[in-house]
Amino acid sequence: MADFSVTPASEDNHDIGNETQSIQSEMAFVASESGDYEDQKTAFVEEEIPSVELRPSALVLASGPLLGKKIDVPPGGLVIGRATTCDITVGSRKDGVSREHARVYFEDNGLFLKDLESTNGLRVNNVSLRFSPLRPGDLIQIGRTLLKVVAGGQDARYHETMYNKAVRDPLTGLFNRQNLQAMLTGEVKAAVKGRRPLCLMMCDIDHFKRVNDQFGHQAGDEVLRQMGRLVRSGLREADRAFRYGGEEVLVLLPNTDIDSAMAIAERLRKMTEMRRFAFGEVVIPLTVSIGVGQFTNSIEALVGKADAALYAAKNGGRNRVVRATQSTDRIDPSS
């Protein structure tokens, strides 16, 4: 399972107490219809909540740049903390998060949360505790990070839909740039933890300005829309593509060495060259230039390598793939 690195949101953006109070108010309203709160509460649970459908099975990030991201709890459970070895990496020591802060796990057909002797403990529905069974709708607070417990079925699908709306570019369908840093950090941590290669492609549509100038911005938008579909169709399930700029696309290739990344990039280049991009009755031929780099020691160096290789592809005549080398690393991006 890939690590998820979460940047905590400000505390005053979330009011756990208000949400809990709202749930209690709804239950009280239902009970008032019969005049008997306890009897009505029991009847409501038995008649309206199928135990299989509402069995808690996942966590949803309720704060930070990956807001709405659903993380399924595996059969063996998962560990939450600030250490990069955790299944979900959250917060920092400054936020009061221990290296291994808490564990979420299944037992006796239920989902449970256990504090791992953390320094500052944790809260569920705004109550401090060290151990708790978890139910759909519960809110877990670790440091300044919030996670919501969700069930399978429609509940999980709803959060997945909302997450996609928040993190994807509406025109291309690719991930948006606002979530690049968090996802890139998570993939780097996963690569370091698992000692696996990680590569990055930087793609740019050649002479895209001519498309806007000659055919108009609506044609340019349609080209970008079709390009987004082409990129998604040419990648593997684990790959992550982002709209990095106007016509630039950045692609993360987990567990991929530089030779394999070059092959993927070349396939994408050929697919673009052969594709008939159309706007109405007009066919617009396009090509792309692609730079490819492999992670070695830092995120900044990885992005810099791919970016420099992209400029080398542009300077070399466009419509080509260039691998980052020591020589491409020294290319001045302004050239």
Image (cartoon, helix red, strand yellow):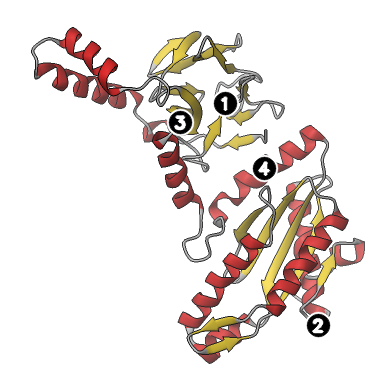
Q: Is the C terminus in the top left, top right, bottom left or bottom right quadrant? A: bottom right
Q: Earlier in the sequence, mark 2 or mark 3?
A: 3
Q: Which sits in the foreground, 118 or 86?
A: 86
Kindly identify which residue carries mark 3.
Answer: 152
- Image coordinates for residue 327, horizontal then vertical, percent: 91, 66
For label 4, the SS is helix
Q: Which amino acid does label 1 sit on?
A: Val
Q: What residue type is labelled 2?
A: Gly
Instruction: Answer few, some or many: residues within 10 Å of disc 2's Cα (few below 14, many 20 plus, some between 14 and 19).
Output: few
Q: Distance between the residues labelled 2 and 4?
A: 33 Å
Kindly identify which residue carries mark 4.
Answer: 185
- Image coordinates for residue 92, horizontal then vertical, percent: 61, 28
Q: Distance between the residues labelled 3 and 4?
A: 28 Å
- Image coordinates for residue 50, horizontal then vertical, percent: 35, 22
Q: Which of marks 2 and 4 is nearer the N terminus?
A: 4
Query: Relative to 202, does residue 21 appear above or below in the rendering?
Result: above
Kindly identify which residue carries mark 1.
Answer: 73
**Cβ atoms at labels 2 and 3 below 8 Å apart:** no
Q: Of tags 3 and 4, which is closer to the observer?
A: 3
Kindly identify which residue carries mark 2.
Answer: 317
Q: What residue type is labelled 4?
A: Thr
Q: How far apart are marks 4 and 1 (CA)?
A: 21 Å
